[in-house]
């Protein structure tokens, strides 16, 4: 697992193909960490980040192990300010305070999952909560419950599970306990992690509103925006890319890969649109290195 800053320039013969947003079985991804790295490398990804929800377990399991491509340590935090608001953090420090907070959030996810399973049971869809937790390697999310429902034939597709039962406002949904942006940004910064807004298209804001939000968050410590995410493609990448660069924020990108049949992208899928991928990735690496304690 290479240290940030050691990734060589690839030159014109083999362009860098980064994927800085990927999930493992430590949160709600389908592949174990080592298998995910091999899967990404086989699909041409040249550098990746493990950004599991509320856990470092997946990234930590790769420490000290030889990997076919460099792997950056990251985390994804779900925030309470508005629907779809997530924050990615990238770093190389041990960050004990951040890890303690992330562990506490993971514990709250267990409580939330137990309540959702209870509600599904009341609706006539009993699931084994202990078995569900035993299959998890880090933290429990709604996708673990969805997969259990699929295995038992309760629903035909993951989308049906969200639409009928587990989506916000549906009968088995339980809101999670989350940090606010005002809490998460300083937490990441003082622990040596670079905070990056994840998939801004999922906020469903117009350009002017997004710009106002970014300006506010930048003042609080936001350092980058995940411009190259699958959800941004329908809106076009160029306008957001231009806005983010004008503001002096880092530009990042990733597939948000969870599994082959998920609502997210495939490894490296946004790199084809990301013309300055190498320079932007190196800029992120430089910011991470400047934060080393």
Image (cartoon, rainbow, N blue to C red):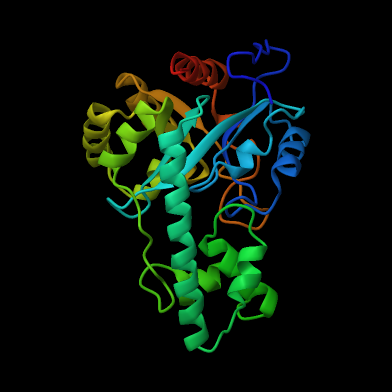
Who's the residue at 36% across and 27% down the image?
A: 189
Q: How many marks?
A: 0
Q: Position of residue 139 (x, y in %)?
A: 55, 55
Instruction: Say above or below: 119 vs 288.
Output: below
Q: Residue at x 57, y 52 (%)?
A: 27
- Kindly tell me whether residue 232 is visible in this rendering: no
Q: Nearer the viewer, residue 182 or 168?
A: 182
Q: Is residue 256 left or right of residue 237?
A: right
Q: Quick check: 161 left or right of 61?
A: left
Q: Which residue is painted at 67% across and 54% down in the image? A: 30
Asked whether the viewer can see residue 13, the reply is: yes
Determine the image quadrant of residue 237: top left
Q: Is residue 68 left or right of residue 186?
A: right
Where in the figure is residue 95, as x and y percent of width and height? Answer: 46, 31
Residue 9 relative to residue 112: left or right:
right
Residue 205 on image: x %, y %: 29, 46
Query: Observer-nearest residue: 249 or 179?
Result: 179
Image point 65% across, 52% down: which residue? 25
Q: Quadrant of the N terminus?
A: top right
Residue 212 at x, y percent in the picture:
21, 35
């Amino acid at each position: 697992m290479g240290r940030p800053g050691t990734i060589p320039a690839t030159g014109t013969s083999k362009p860098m193909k980064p994927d800085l947003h990927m999930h493992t079985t430590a949160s709600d991804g389908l592949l174990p960490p080592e298998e995910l790295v091999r899967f990404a490398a086989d699909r041409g990804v040249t550098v990746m980040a493990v950004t599991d929800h509320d856990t470092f377990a997946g990234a930590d399991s790769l420490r000290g192990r030889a990997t076919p491509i460099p792997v950056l340590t990251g985390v994804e935090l779900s925030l309470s300010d508005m629907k779809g608001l997530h924050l990615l953090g990238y770093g190389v420090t041990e960050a004990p305070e951040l890890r303690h907070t992330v562990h506490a959030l993971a514990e709250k996810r267990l409580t939330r999952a137990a309540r959702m399973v209870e509600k599904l049971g009341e609706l006539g869809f009993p699931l084994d909560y202990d078995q569900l937790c035993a299959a998890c390697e880090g933290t429990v999310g709604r996708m673990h419950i969805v997969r259990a429902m699929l295995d038992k034939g309760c629903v035909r597709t993951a989308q049906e599970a969200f639409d009928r039962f587990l989506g916000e406002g549906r009968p088995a949904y339980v809101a999670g306990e989350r940090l606010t942006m005002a809490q998460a940004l300083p937490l990441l910064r003082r622990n040596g992690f670079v905070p990056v807004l994840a998939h801004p298209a999922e906020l469903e804001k117009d350009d002017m509103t997004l710009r106002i939000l970014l300006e506010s968050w930048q003042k609080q410590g936001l350092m980058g925006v995940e411009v190259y995410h699958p959800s941004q493609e329908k809106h076009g990448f160029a306008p957001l890319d231009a806005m983010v660069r004008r503001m002096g924020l880092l530009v990042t990108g990733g597939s948000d890969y969870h599994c082959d049949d998920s609502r997210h992208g495939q490894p490296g899928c946004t790199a084809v649109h990301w013309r300055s991928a190498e320079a932007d990735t190196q800029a992120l690496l430089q910011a991470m290195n400047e934060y080393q304690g």
